[in-house]
Image: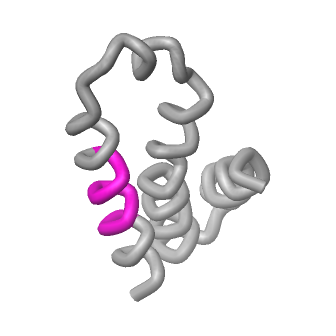
Amino acid sequence: MSNIAYLLVGYLLVSLYRRRKSEQISKDWDIRILVTLPIIIGIGSSLWHIYATNWSLYVDVIPILLFM
C-alpha cells in the first residue's frame, strides 16, 4: 500500500509541477529531482519487495538516501 501511495504522491507532484508555467522552472533542477523521487522510491521499493535480490536492494535504498 505504501508503494502505491508513493506513486500517487509522485504523480500529483509532477502534475502540480507541470502546471506552473514559468521560465524559473527550467532552472530548478533540484525541484525536478525532488518531484520525481517519490516515483522512483515507489518503483524501487516495489522491485525490492518483488525480487529481494542485491540489485533490487540498491534500487530501493539509493533513492531513499538521495531523498534524505
Question: Is 51 in front, or is 30?
Answer: 30
Based on the displayed image, in which of its 4 quarters is residue 21 positioned? top left
Left or right: 66, with 53 as reference point: right
Residue drawn 36% across the image and 53% down it: 13
The residue nearer to you, when weighing 21 against 35, is 21
Find residue 55 and report its horizontal and vertical position in percent: 66, 50
Question: Does residue 36 show up magenta in the picture?
Answer: no
Query: Residue 68, how many percent across, how many down?
Result: 78, 55
| Left or right relative to 67: residue 41 | left
In the rendered image, the vertical position of residue 42 relative to residue 39, given as above or below: below
Question: Can you say whether 48 is above or below 63 in the image?
Answer: below
Q: Main secondary structure of the magenta part?
A: helix
Above/below status of 44 relative to 30 = below
The quadrant of the image that shows the N terminus is bottom left
Residue visible at 21% across and 38% down in the picture: 19
Residue 15, percent from left and from top:
24, 47
Q: Quadrant of residue 56?
A: bottom right
Residue located at (61% from left, 70% from top): 52
Q: Is residue 26 left or right of residue 27?
A: left
Tell me the colour scheme of the image.
Answer: one colour
Measured from the top left, where is residue 26 in percent x and y? 42, 14
Identify the residue shown where x is 54% and y is 58%: 41
Q: Residue furthest bottom?
A: 1
Highlighted range, magenta: 7-14
8 in the magenta segment: yes
**Number of numbered discs overlaid on the protein picture:** 0
Q: Where 42 sits versus 17, above or below?
A: below
